[in-house]
Image (cartoon, rainbow, N blue to C red):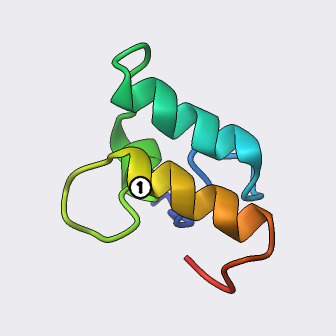
Amino acid sequence: MTMVVKGDVTGTGEIEASDARAVLRHVAKLDELKGEFFAAADLNGDGDVDASAARMILRYVAGLEKSL
């Protein structure tokens, strides 16, 4: 069983700006997030990943959000 950490889209164990980059690449259809990576990017649990997830991740990384 794989544990999904919301916001850790790259699976490094940390939430970083590179996670927001991965979300934006998915949104732009340059890459495709699948499985646990998609689940980590679906921050609001609506089954969709959009640019707002990247924004939330960057705000978290910058310390403007306490949680995702």
| Residue at image point 27% right, 69% down | 45
Q: Does the image show residue 7?
A: no
| Residue at image point 74% right, 46% down | 17
Secondary structure found at label 1: helix
| Amino acid type shown at disc 1 | Ser
How many labels were placed on the picture?
1
Q: Position of residue 27 (x, y in %)?
A: 36, 31
| Residue at image point 41% right, 45% down | 51
Q: Does the image show residue 49?
A: yes
Depicted 8 relative to depicted 27: above or below: below
| Residue at image point 40% right, 66% down | 43
Residue at the far left in the pictured view: 47
Mark 1 Cα-neighbour bin, 10 Å: few <14, some 14–19, many ≥20:
some
Depicted 37 relative to depicted 43: above or below: above
Depicted 31 relative to depicted 55: above or below: above
Q: Quadrant of the C terminus?
A: bottom right
Residue at the far top in the pictured view: 30
Where does label 1 land, which residue? 52
Depicted 18 relative to depicted 43: above or below: above
Q: Position of residue 57 (x, y in %)?
A: 61, 59
Q: Is residue 48 left or right of residue 39?
A: left
Question: Residue 1 is drawn in which quadrant?
Answer: bottom left
Q: Position of residue 9 (x, y in %)?
A: 56, 47
Q: Position of residue 61 (x, y in %)?
A: 76, 63
